Each structure stands twice: as structure tokens, then as C-alpha cells.
Image (cartoon, rainbow, N blue to C red):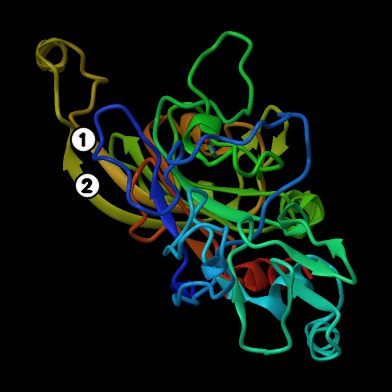
Amino acid sequence: MTNPPNSNPTSGVTGLPGTQPPQAANLPGAQPPQAADPSSTQSLQDTSQSDTQPSQATNLPGTQPPQAADSAGQFPMRLQKYLARAGVASRRGSENLMTAGQVTVNGQVVKELGYKITPGIDQVRVNDVLVHPADLPTYLMLHKPAGYLTTMDDPQGRPTVRQLIPFEQKPGLFPVGRLDNDTTGLLLFMTDGELAHRLLHPRRHVPKRYRVIADGQLQQEQLDQLRQGIVLNDGITLPAIIELGAVSRKPLTAREKIRLNVDKTFSPWQTELYCTITEGRKRQVKRMFSAIGHPVIELSRIAFGPLELADLLQGSWRNLSDSEVQQLKDAVD
Ligand code: URA
């Protein structure tokens, strides 16, 4: 698996208690959040543009001064791209609309094809009809920490991943699949229901790669079992890729040190493994390892399809680049 090309996607630290102050881009709360209907499926735009020059339209009188990115991490993007993303026309068709003088930005006709706007700030109209940034799909990845439920709403008020992403700015975002409360790692969010459906469809077999710390030392036979398929209560698992990492001593509590002396079944060892599965059954990795007598101690998803978590900090999110979105689409075509 290779590192996805990264065209300067934006990122943000999402205000975890005890973490560093958030970075400039994607600061939740840097501007008052928009009134958001949580049930709404509308979204703001993909802000993964590599353009870094300040928007020209934001310099117009009465608008905000130029800035690198707004509170939702919205970077300037080419006007024709914005129009195409919003579904107004193809990229070429959007260029034609511009050169024909049918597109205005903050009330002024813009014909220049290199013109950049900041979605959500600049008012773009085609033949006097406002093009909403909400029409643009959004895709992001979160490095989920432990202790957050993969749900957008918990009636019991426990911490959820919703608190970690810019949901107020992009109210249509939903998680693609789920990670257990104590599982960390790559969790995708998007407003594109069709792509999410494809990525999660059991017949698509999108690979998910996990770093596993399992209790004890695994025998060759057990590695083979994991690779070939494990019988679980909901059926046998599909073949998995299992790579063996380091075997190390477990950090033991005082109580475990005592147990080590009296309990012959207690192992002081733990094993790191990399496990790639192409299904998405509930608690699948944990159940596979428990079934061979080596329960999971730690679990982190490090790749989803063609995308890797890489060095995204725990608790942070970033927008996917155009190329990454395309790679996801290609993976389920
Ligand atoms: N498998 C699990 O057991 N848990 C997860 O969170 C993801 C995959």
C-alpha cells in the first residue's frame, strides 16, 4: 500500500481536553457556528484545494479580509472548479458560463478562468441564482482516539466522534462504518452517501488494515488459521492478510506481576501484528483473535482502502485531497 498523494489537505486539532491548542485551519468555534440542523444532509464544500493564494473576491468592499482559511478550513478554490463541484456544469461547461459573463462573484461578473473564491465567504451566482457551498460534497479522515463512540448522537451523552469533527460547519457529515469505542485510527467521514454505501458494501471487499497488539505469543498454526478463516458465530471469516510484528513483554501492573507467579496460563508477552480484512463485521478483528485464544489488547486502523492514516495526529482530522477522493471512487468502481 502506498502513501496517497496529498495535495495540501487541510487539517485541524479538534480541541481534545489536554491537547495543544487547535491549529489555525479548521478551528471549531473560531467563528460562531452556523445554526445547524443535525438531521440535515446538506454539506459544505470539500476544502482540499491546494490553492494557497488569498481569494480575490474576498477583497471586495463589504466582505471579510483575505485569509488563509476560514473556520471550517475553507481554502480558496478556482471558480470553475467550485461550479463543477456544486454540480452547476462540467469543469469545461463552467468555464464557458464564466467566459459568457453568466457568473458573478459578490455581484461582479468574473470571466477570468484563474479566478479564485473562498467557498462559504464569496457569493457566487450563475444567472443570478446563488450557488450554495452546501452543494459541495465533503470528505475527511479523522484519527479517532479511544473513548469516543462512532455515532453522531448518544442519548446517554457519552463522548462521540461528532465532537471531533467540524460538524457544525458541515452538518451532513456522517462516519463511514464504525470503530469500537476503544479502537483508535482512521475513520472516514463524508456527505456523499453513494460513495459511503459502496465503500461499506460487503460485496466490494474494501480492505481495512489494522495494527493489532494481541495477548501472548502466536504459533504458526494460529497465524495460518487467521489467514485462512476463523469460524465465528456469524460464519467463517474471509481470508485475511496477517503480518507478524514484534513480540515484547507486556507492561505489567503490580497485580499482574503477582499473577504471573501463580497463574501458569498468564503470558507476560504481547505480539504486534498487522491484519488486513476485507469484511466489516461487528468487532471482527477482536473476535478473530479471541477465537484463537489471543485477545486483542490494542487495536488501531491504519488504512481504509487506498488511504493511509500516516502521521495524522490522534484527535485530528483533515480533508481528503481530490486525488484521495478519486482513489476511493476507483477502489469501488
Ligand atoms: N474490528 C474490531 O474488532 N473492532 C473495530 O473497531 C474494528 C474492527
Q: Name the residue under label 1.
A: 269
Label placed on residue 247: 2
Frontmost residue, 155 versus 298: 155
Image quadrant holding the C terminus, namely bottom right
Q: Give left or right: position of 33 versus 265.
A: right
At label 1, counting other C-alpha atoms closer than 10 Å, the crowd grade (few under 14, some 14-19, many 20 or more) is some
Kindly indicate the quadrant of the structure image that contains residue 40. top right
Q: Do the residues labelled 2 and 1 touch (CB within 8 Å)?
A: yes
Residue drawn at x 54%, y 41% as measured from the top left: 166
* Residue type marked 1: Trp
Frontmost residue, 87 versus 327: 87
Can residue 196 be seen in this snapshot?
yes
Vertical arrangement, residue 256 with respect to residue 49, above or below: above
In space, the residues marked 2 and 1 are separated at their CA atoms by 7 Å
The numbered mark, 2 or 1, whose residue comes first in the sequence reads 2
Residue 328 at x, y percent in the picture: 66, 66
Residue drawn at x 73%, y 59% as measured from the top left: 136
Residue drawn at x 74%, y 52% as measured from the top left: 134
Frontmost residue, 138 versus 73: 73
Residue 56 at x, y percent in the picture: 54, 75
Can residue 277 be seen in this snapshot?
no
SS assignment at label 1: strand
Label placed on residue 79: none
Residue 133 at x, y percent in the picture: 71, 57
* Residue type marked 2: Val
Frontmost residue, 184 versus 43: 43
SS assignment at label 2: strand
Q: Give left or right: position of 248 versus 234.
A: left
Residue drawn at x 63%, y 28% as measured from the top left: 152
Determine the residue located farthest toward the front in the rendered image.
61
Vertical arrangement, residue 303 with respect to residue 257, above or below: below
Kindly indicate the quadrant of the structure image that contains residue 47. bottom right
